[in-house]
Amino acid sequence: MIQTVISENLPVDERLIIKKNSIGTKGGKRVCIVTGIHGDELEGQYVCYELMRRLKKDIHQLKGLVELYPALNPLGVDSVSRAIPTFDLDMNRIFPGNPDGHMIEYVAHRIIEDLAGADLVIDIHSSNIYLYEIPQARVSKTFADKLMPIVQMLNLDFIWVHDAATVLESTIAHSLNSIGTPTVVVEMGIGMKITKEYGDKLVDGIINVLDKFGMWGGDLPVRIHKPIVSTIGDVCFINANYSGVIINTIPNLTRVSKGDVLCQIVSSLTGDVLENVEAPVDGLLFTMRSYPIVYEGSLLARIFYENNPV
Amino acid sequence: MKQCDIFTMKSPFRDDYRIPGFYFGNGDKTVAIVGAMRGNEVQQLFICSQLVKNLIALEGEGKINPNVGILVIPTVNPYSLNIHKRFWAMDNTDINRMFPGYDQGETTQRIAAALFETVKGYEYGIQLSSYYLNGNFVPHVRVMDTGYQDIESAESFGLPFVYEYEPRPYDTTLLNYNWQIFETKAFSVYGGSTDVINKDLAKQTWTGILRFLHAKGIIDKPMHGGMVPFRLKNDKLSTVVSRQSGILYPRCDIAQNVKKGDLLAEVLSPYMGETLDSIYSPVTGTVFFAHHTPLIHQHSRIFQIVEYIE
Ligand SMILES: [Zn+2]
């Protein structure tokens, strides 16, 4: 059943509409999938489509309610804008919103109201247009105890447990987790693209969660991948030391060894190589820059490495 | 006056990125003034340029206390100003959400780190700030309630209002928050407009800053004492939100005194011109902020009114 969660009037003969599609039955458990909070992140579009397709095919096997919110920032998704158009504001920095506030704060408040009480919310992101990410969950230490068992079921490659940052308290995930609605953030792929292989993996993971929640009696994925969890090591950030153009970027996000060349920064004006960017450690390359123009400081890669037991 | 770049960086193809600093006086770090951090803050740039002009004249007359050190940075972000982009030219990040910065991090974190390294340790810090909504404010000084705020000094600008507010989670990455944490007495000065130059409001603002410098014995420029500021907290600020969307037809402007029930604005139908909604003041007070936008959304924050206790 398709429902309108938000309907706000825009100046000229149009409404800002946020829709959700709920399938299954009320009364049991409820799992919500939200995406499109950043208008340039589209991997979640495929996940919503494919999950809905699989669930609808075997709808009688679904116990409980699955709700899909494919575009929390519909103006952004439809106009290739990461932020909320006209405000240039990151929508994931305005939660939990304010019922008496400006339209966007009001919308944020209503979204939280609608999602509150779910047994699980999965917020799907796809990086930005610059960086490619392997399928991973981002979990704040504050909520790790509660969320770790769930994220392990999601068929992801990596779980990044990060320190609590005050600035992240304005995200939808933090706002929901703070009121006791477990919310998991998934990052995968890259902005403005759909990586079908990653989407299929995550849909398998979501079906697995539904099964473990006792919500699914249909076909199950053949294999669920056990993720690497960041608590057994550290994350190393590799930033550009020069401004220029990156070429020869490593083709697959995979395990790398110390000294492997991840990419080269070159000057297209002089024909010189400015920097051979090497992996400083052995580990899992889970983030890699895709966008070719870089400034000094631009993030090029992130590698997870295990701490050697002493 | 001594001019030198506090930070430079090469870009792939643009001219070098430079943040200029203008130093006056021979003493320690007394006051740092930071102008436009975003590419639409032309009023803030203009105000700083007038301050530099005034300080050069005062220096020529020997009226800058030789035992002080003044630093004025008219802009941190010429790259964005030059292409009419509010945030960072490459990745749309906001330098003023990156403090205290990180010199090994992303480009805007490095810029923030370089700026903070330079302006840290000053006794007073003044930042010319702007708001995410287009519109005009009555020039005022804002101080974050971090436990280190100095309200009396904020009053010595002689601007009509001093606004003391509680930092929200995402405010912890602002320059002013970090200044205060590092024991600089920090003030955000709102110079009326943002992306258009309003000379009257600008003059009121730079005069206020000069008045502050005189009050602190930094310059010798006896001048009119300004106003006795009205101390303001959130509870005295009444927000007027539009119930309808359409063409906004304002009937009042900032600094105007209004009575409860006075007409503030009308919202007109974008096609047929009739009045959809008349917006009346909910309180008696002074118009503090007026949103300047010809087209408004439903639930837009159109005015903020400072309520007077009678
Ligand atoms: Zn995102």
Image (cartoon, helix red, strand yellow):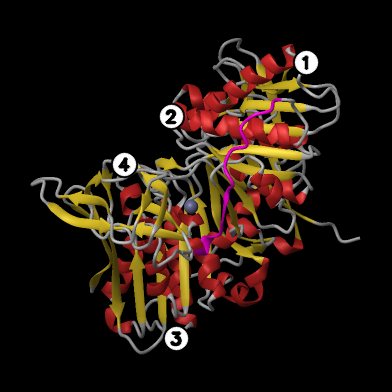
The chain to which mark 2 is attached is B
What's under tag 4, amino acid-wise? Answer: Thr
Q: Which residue is mark 3?
A: A214
Position above or below: B275 against A61: above
Q: Residues within 10 Å of mark 4 (few under 14, many from 20)?
A: some
Q: Which residue is mark 4?
A: B293
Same chain for the residues at labels 3 and 1, yes or no?
Answer: no
Q: Which residue is mark 2?
A: B198
Query: Secondary structure beneath disc 2?
Result: loop
Position above or below: B35 against B135: above
Foreground tag (1 vs 2)? 1
Q: Which residue is mark 1?
A: B62
Q: Which residues are magenta?
A: B221-235
* Front residue of A105 and A168: A105
Asked whether, in this view, residue A266 is left or right of residue B275, the answer is right
What's under tag 3, amino acid-wise? Answer: Gly
What is the CA distance from the residue labelled 4 to the residue labelled 2? Answer: 16 Å
Same chain for the residues at labels 1 and 4, yes or no?
Answer: yes
Q: Is residue B36 magenta?
A: no
